Amino acid sequence: MVSSMAATSIAGASETAADVLMIRGGRPLTGEVAIRGAKNALPKIMVATLLTAERCTLRNVADVADVEIVADLIGALGGSVERPEPGTLVIDNRNLQPMQRSVLKEFSGKSRIPILTCGPLLARFGEAPIPSLGGCRIGPRPVDFHIRALQELGGDLHEETGASRLTAKSLKGTKIRLDYPSVGATEQVILAAVRAEGVTELSNAAVEPEIVDLICVLQKMGAIIMVDTDRVITIFGVKELGGFEHATIPDRLEAASWACAAVTTNGRIFVRNARQIDMMTFLNKFRQLGGDFTVREDGIEFWRGGELCSIPIETDVHPGFMTDWQQPFVIALTQARGVSVVHETVYEERFGYVDALNKMGARIQLYRECLGSRKCRFGQRNYLHSAVVVGPTPLHGQRIHIPDLRAGFSYVIAALAAEGVSTLENVSLIGRGYENIYVKLRALGAELVE
Ligand code: EPU
């Protein structure tokens, strides 16, 4: 339990008891925001600490919900998580215990992270309960790759109602191929194989910068992991892992979200700590759209370079255009001249947020066909996974219920660009990935209605 963190409101989103954010749109966002450690790296690195009894220090920690959930989970497993100063966590897992049923029950459904404890707990105790998962509802999001890979490493699956678990006397390195380069399943294999006997070769792996950051942490802990250019990750099992000190990479999803806010509202935002290397694909599309930017040593500044014009977007695993950039980018496309085509190939149901945008005045039509340069897994399966956006269309304020994290921030951008007042409900969901959103919006000149 992180005592000092628990008292902090998540992303400032609990400022209003009704969990509602009201924005009067029409003002360009101008100024500076700072981003901290990546929401999709931090909790996984915290899970990696389960692999050692030595002290681990994590810096550049953002105050987002998943960090708090994993801190509480580590505490419930007998570990200790301290926050000696804002943005730093010190984790000590020397007294870690196997996961009890009560802990499994408490953390099931809260987030997608607890499934990643399976590998480390199997390695440390020979037994790992399988939590059921939470996270955003953007498709079925199964965990079949995770379980199959753990079985291939030597785990035995015991299926019991409400409390399935894996056991293993020892894990043994092997060759594993993922059906799809899943981020979570890649992390699962790495976290399990790092303490297995022998060598594990994982092919068709995901190689997102957040995964590479996790690998860097494991290397600091004593692991030997090779990442090849052809999506093959080779993990040499080691007997013991030690502690580490690490500053997590900045959140490229948050950086892109502010970039989209700048270009959509015709403002100018300097995102302190944003890194070009993690965002090259985004920056290329941003420039093609009509956005402009300057890369500085301490961050990236974003603004509208001229008239926005329509472009095609196809989401993909890294180094492709991230699925999490899709929603904020689509809001920018509603203000671009012409017809833009967006093909979502990572999640089958990631356009659920579009209806509300159309009510605000956008012209977005969804299609079941693959409207991209290639066929994807969803083309034959009746999912509305392509979108055609016709712009520019003026947006006007609406009352909108936020369905998931990235859709939530996109509605914030739409509300900022819209005429009149928008009322966003379920706004605390945004706190899963964006810290201090109220503070940041006010600092950039947004008009939040009290
Ligand atoms: N998949 C399976 N079986 C599995 C695992 C995945 O079929 O066992 C499928 C999924 O259903 C999906 C695709 O593979 O269609 C990709 O899923 P992936 O496992 O890569 O996603 P994830 O690990 O659950 C992470 C991020 C997501 C991000 C994706 C893709 C975290 C906590 N979440 O999810 O972030 O969209 O990778 O980059 O790291 C967000 O930040 O808003 C978010 C949803």
Image: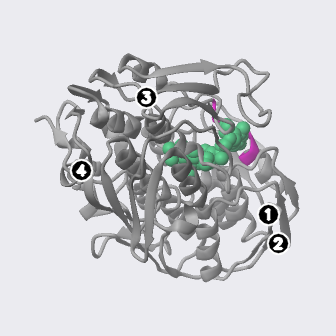
Disc 3 or disc 1, which is closer to the eye?
A: 3
Looking at the image, do the residues carrying marks 2 and 1 touch, with CB atoms under 8 Å apart? yes
* Left or right, 195 with reference to 322: right
Labelled disc at residue 9: 4
Mark 2, residue position: 197
Kind of residue indicated by mark 3: Pro
Which of labels 3 and 4 is toward the front? Answer: 3
Is tag 3's residue or tag 4's residue first in the polypeptide sequence? 4
Mark 3 = which residue?
A: 392
Mark 2 and mark 4 lie on one chain; the one further toward the N terminus is 4
Q: Are marks 2 and 4 in contact (CB under 8 Å)?
A: no
Q: How far apart in space, not on screen, are marks 3 and 1 (Cα)?
A: 56 Å
As helix, strand or loop, the secondary structure at mark 2 comes to: loop
Crowding at mark 1 (Cα within 10 Å: few <14, some 14-19, many 20+): many
Q: Count the numbered circles shown.
A: 4
Query: Can you tell which of label 4 and label 1 is closer to the viewer?
Result: 4
Q: CA distance from mark 2 to mark 4?
A: 43 Å
**First in residue order: circle 2 vs circle 1:** 1
Residue 327, visible in the rendered structure: yes
State the CA–CA distance, disc 4 to disc 1: 40 Å
**Residues in magenta, as a range:** 140-146
